[in-house]
């Protein structure tokens, strides 16, 4: 199967117009020594029907959230995605458009991005948002790059209770950025503000996560204050779905707010594509990476939207750009906007409250079944760490045999938590499912 | 004008209802961490939410709407079967931390895609992790650095980039902690090899090259360029933005490149979604494999598939998990539908471009008079000199004929550039209609220049003032303080000089 449109007659007419006898003549500019002289060693073409059958077979060998009750989270969550999201994203005018370089052809997506930027600013309490970054890890590197140039400092601080993948990606980028990365350990599941204050000295920025990787609520205002006292940029990595219940980073002194957008509007999709968001106070607008949409007027004085502040960007500033990003995650950010518009402020808050209450119920049930909370003194949001009293991989294997994925094995990233599970409870879980989880883990 | 969704909002209206099971315990959030004021998200009933976004979609133009010859962006048809496939629950609802035995289908798909991309690029090992082309570039440069660091060769800090390169190349170089060494283009549109010889030194780490270049021309001296770099101990990086020209025809690995990124959203038809997502896998020669990001997707001796984190020399991770999986599903499906016929895909892309070029080169300036590959660059410099008509005017007028504009003002070395890429999926009738429009516009430039300067006339908005947008920087809705959309339109006036994208 192919998607080519030319007939043999078309080809002949076109070759005649070009003035060559064959398509091969067009490739004579390629030196003979580097022309590929055999057929690509790929499997034969498939018809649409065969293709679907092949991919269905591959998909069937995955155990998705419909085939197993899942308490897996650790950064990607099984939240409900409303049908509206699928409907809007299937509009070919959005799906099959490129980046809106020609605004008169792209008012729909430009306005949607402007509305997305507004939603992210409302959620985070910030003044400006970009049109999206790749994911919740790369926006942390963006924040470091902003902070490096804003402060002229060469150290960044990340709390150990921040998602391990975020820390790993920051460390990978830091080599090229010329930044030293310092990690501040967690104390009983959260960060000690005084310890952070000492680390923040001479730092370009301080990145912490709220709720943190363990699901615990950090003393976020104190952490931001510790960064601000050292004149380091306070950067909060937040979960958008939590921000109907939890305070916005802009309201407790952060300079930037970043995060993984997946929980608002995106399917789990084995880790992507999703979107990262990055929002900042207005003083950093000209240091922001990536696309930003702004409002303007057309030649008739009517309101319209364009990509703006482009002198920050690589196609104009080249090696002096604020980032190399061009393609971002617009369609996934649009999904986020649709989901948030469907939720509204009350729906967002209700989602958070249901997550909170179900997670509290899960804590009760699991502790009643003999598990112990890893960090019993900490408040949590939708996720919490629990010790199951035996090697956690064994517990996962046994639970999965019963049709339940009980959560993430924290020993993959943290020493001293060999028997600890990270259990995520979204609004999609039910009391019955939680009861079964407790039974299975008790067994 | 379309109202913003926030301007349609009514307090207390709602679309969603969230389940709240009875009998759950109260959960405590410390008061100082609780949200004081709710975010001002839109409050609409569901039908109005859907109508809003449907209306916005009608104000947007995609490849589904019509011809989209945006040079260097490879706007080809996006097969709908791939959308059906990516929505299978086994793909869309799969958690990235699922145990390996519960993700065998996903892992096999990624492993198969890696094998395919290795064959298409002529290289040995692939990482799918980078999220887009520019992240692929940066990842590639991280590999270059790791490679030379491992050899104790710390003085190599310079990367050679031709003046035709995408802006992402120099931006990536800076982010990798390297410096740019620019190299000129010769009169045939190739890299100026004499200039190159002087610039490659023992401090040179790599070349970054798009081939065919952004001029749509294959570098005729590629073998000599490879000899210069490899002779100096430097590496060769291939920007795969234009891979659509050469699939099955010439492979970067055979040209001598050591690292390649592939834009899955260009060559392999991931829909671009109004700005993303993309996918930027990288393929490398065996010597660079130890440095690739973790985890590697591997096939084990027992035939099962898995993730390998045990790579002591890895650069680390450049994004979460194993990359944008949904993009892999679509691109894998696209490639499997073609198989070895990918060569025919590239042949038709090149045929279509040369046909447009043949029909248009007398009406516009052609800076490099050669057959092109999958795209070509015209210039409106004569129109500008004789009639005051710019590439921007031509682009805007094309919209009135129902076409998306080409890429304009790029590459930077061509004044008033119009970069045109038709792709392989357009029928001849569409190509002819586009040519007729371009020829008509060239005539209009002489006869009715105001028609072009005022274009577009038939879009939802007239020409937009980008300078004003940058000066005022209104980048979010201001609620009560927002400029009144129903206010009197301001006096129409001469727009300030604008540049294209």
Image (spheres, grey):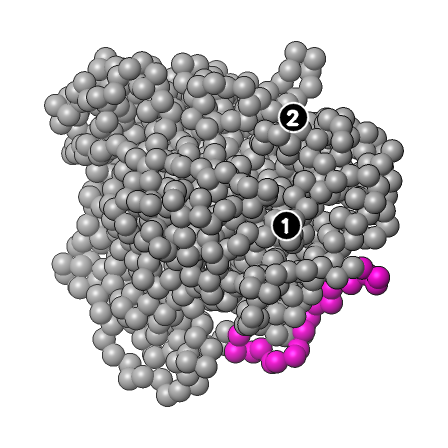
Q: Quadrant of the N terminus of chain A?
A: top right
Residue found at x 33% / y 67%: B473
Could you classify mark 1 by the number of other residues whose Cα lies within 10 Å: few (under 14), some (14-19), or many (20 or more)?
some
Q: Is residue A414 at all visible to an observer of this figure?
A: yes
**Residue under disc 1 on the same chain as residue under disc 2:** no
Residue closer to the observer: A124 or A297:
A124
Measuring from the top left, give residue A291's x and y in whole percent. Answer: 39, 55
Residue B399 is drawn in which quadrant?
A: bottom left
Of all chains, the one bearing label 2 is B
Range covered by the magenta-colored residues: B6-24
Q: Residue at x 30, y 30 (%)?
A: B208
Q: Are circles 1 and 2 on residues that touch, CB within 8 Å?
A: no
Residue beneath the point at 38% across and 44% down? A198
Residue A220 at x, y percent in the picture: 50, 55
Q: Which residue is mark 2?
A: B108
Task: Give the number of the mark in front: 1 or 2.
Answer: 1
Q: Position of residue A287 (x, y in %)?
A: 31, 54
Q: Residue at x 28, y 81 (%)?
A: B492
Q: What's the CA distance linking mark 1 and mark 2?
A: 41 Å
* Residue A101 position by quadrant: bottom left
Q: Is residue A249 above or below residue A136?
A: below
Disc 1 on helix, strand or loop?
loop
Picture layout, residue B181 above or below residue B29: above
Tell me how many marks there are.
2
The residue pinned by badge 1 equals A378
Residue B274 visible in this rendered orientation of the protein = no
């Amino acid at each position: 199967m192919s998607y080519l449109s030319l007939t043999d007659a078309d080809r002949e007419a076109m070759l005649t117009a070009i003035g060559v006898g064959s398509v091969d003549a067009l490739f004579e500019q390629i030196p003979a020594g580097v022309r590929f002289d055999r057929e690509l060693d790929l499997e034969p073409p498939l018809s649409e029907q065969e293709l679907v059958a092949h991919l269905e077979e591959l998909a069937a060998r995955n155990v998705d959230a419909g085939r197993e009750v899942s308490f897996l989270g650790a950064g990607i969550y099984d939240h409900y995605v409303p049908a509206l999201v699928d409907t809007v994203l299937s509009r070919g005018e959005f799906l099959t458009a490129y980046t809106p370089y020609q605004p008169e052809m792209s008012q729909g997506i430009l306005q949607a991005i402007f509305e997305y930027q507004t939603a992210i600013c409302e959620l985070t309490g910030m003044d400006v948002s970009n049109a999206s970054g790749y994911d919740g890890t790369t926006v942390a590197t963006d924040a470091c790059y902003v902070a490096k140039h804003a402060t002229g400092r060469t150290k960044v601080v990340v709390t150990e209770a921040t998602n391990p993948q975020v820390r790993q990606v920051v460390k990978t980028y830091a080599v090229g950025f010329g930044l030293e990365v310092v990690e501040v350990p967690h104390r009983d599941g959260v960060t000690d503000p005084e310890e952070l204050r000492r680390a923040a000295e001479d730092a370009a920025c301080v990145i912490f996560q709220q709720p943190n990787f363990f699901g615990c609520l950090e003393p976020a205002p104190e952490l931001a204050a510790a960064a601000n006292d050292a004149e380091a940029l306070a950067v909060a990595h937040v979960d958008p779905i939590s921000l109907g219940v939890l305070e916005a980073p802009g309201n407790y002194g952060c300079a930037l707010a970043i995060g993984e957008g997946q929980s608002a509007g995106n399917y789990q999709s084995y880790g992507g594509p999703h979107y990262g968001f990055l929002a900042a106070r207005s003083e950093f607008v000209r240091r922001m990476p990536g696309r930003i949409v702004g409002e303007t007027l057309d030649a008739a004085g009517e309101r319209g939207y364009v990509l703006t502040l482009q002198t920050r960007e690589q196609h104009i500033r080249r090696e002096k750009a604020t980032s190399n990003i061009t393609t971002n995650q617009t369609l996934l950010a649009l999904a986020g906007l649709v989901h948030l518009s469907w939720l509204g402020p009350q729906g967002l808050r209700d989602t958070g409250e249901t997550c909170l209450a179900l997670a509290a119920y899960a804590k009760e049930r699991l502790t009643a079944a003999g598990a112990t909370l890893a960090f019993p003194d900490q408040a949590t949001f939708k996720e919490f760490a629990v010790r199951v009293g035996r090697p956690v991989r064994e517990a996962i294997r046994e639970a999965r045999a019963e049709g339940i994925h009980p959560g993430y094995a924290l020993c993959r990233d943290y020493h001293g938590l060999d028997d600890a599970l990270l259990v995520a409870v979204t609004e999609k879980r039910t009391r019955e499912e939680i009861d079964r989880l407790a039974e299975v883990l008790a067994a | 004008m379309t109202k913003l969704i926030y301007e349609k909002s009514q307090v207390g209206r709602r679309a969603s209802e969230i389940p709240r099971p009875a009998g759950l315990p109260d959960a405590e959030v410390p008061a100082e961490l609780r949200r004081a004021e709710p975010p001002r998200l839109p409050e609409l009933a569901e039908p109005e939410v859907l109508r809003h976004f449907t209306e916005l979609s009608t104000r947007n133009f995609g490849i589904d709407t019509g011809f989209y010859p945006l040079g260097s962006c490879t706007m080809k048809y996006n097969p709908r079967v791939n959308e059906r496939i990516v929505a299978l629950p086994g793909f869309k609802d799969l958690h990235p931390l699922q145990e390996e035995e519960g993700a065998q289908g996903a892992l096999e798909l990624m492993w198969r895609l890696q094998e395919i991309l290795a064959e298409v690029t002529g290289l040995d090992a692939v990482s799918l992790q980078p999220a887009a082309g520019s992240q692929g570039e940066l990842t590639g440069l991280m590999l270059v650095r790791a490679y030379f660091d491992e050899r104790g060769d710390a003085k190599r800090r310079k990367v050679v980039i031709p003046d035709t390169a995408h802006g992402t190349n120099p931006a990536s170089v800076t982010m990798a902690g390297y410096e740019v060494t620019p190299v000129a283009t010769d009169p045939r549109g190739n890299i100026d090899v004499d200039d190159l010889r002087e610039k490659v030194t023992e401090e040179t780490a790599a070349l970054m090259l798009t081939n065919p270049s952004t001029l749509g021309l294959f570098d005729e001296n590629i073998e000599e360029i490879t000899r210069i770099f490899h002779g100096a101990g430097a590496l060769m990086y291939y920007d795969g933005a234009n891979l659509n020209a050469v699939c099955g025809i010439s492979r970067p690995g055979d040209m001598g490149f050591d690292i390649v990124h592939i834009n899955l959203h260009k060559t392999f038809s991931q829909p671009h979604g109004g700005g993303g997502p993309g996918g930027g896998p990288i393929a490398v020669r065996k010597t660079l494999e130890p440095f690739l990001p973790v985890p590697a997707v591997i096939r084990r001796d027992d035939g099962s598939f898995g993730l390998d984190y045990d790579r002591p020399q890895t650069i680390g991770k450049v994004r979460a998990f194993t990359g944008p999986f949904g993009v892999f599903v679509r691109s894998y499906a696209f490639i499997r539908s073609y198989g070895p016929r990918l060569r025919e895909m590239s042949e038709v892309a090149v045929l279509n471009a040369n046909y447009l070029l043949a029909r248009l080169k007398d009406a516009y300036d052609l800076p490099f008079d050669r057959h092109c590959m999958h795209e070509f660059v015209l210039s409106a410099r004569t129109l500008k000199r004789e009639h005051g008509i710019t590439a921007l005017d031509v682009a805007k007028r094309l919209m009135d004929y129902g076409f998306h504009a080409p890429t304009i003002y790029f590459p930077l070395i061509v004044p008033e550039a119009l970069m045109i890429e038709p792709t392989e999926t357009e029928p001849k009738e569409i190509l002819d209609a586009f040519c007729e429009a371009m020829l008509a516009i060239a005539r209009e430039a002489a006869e009715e220049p105001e028609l072009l300067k005022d274009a577009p006339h038939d879009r939802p908005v007239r020409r937009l003032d980008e300078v004003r947008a940058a000066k005022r920087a209104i980048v979010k809705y201001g609620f009560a303080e927002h400029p009144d959309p129903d206010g009197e339109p301001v006096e129409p006036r001469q727009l300030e000089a604008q540049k294209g994208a």
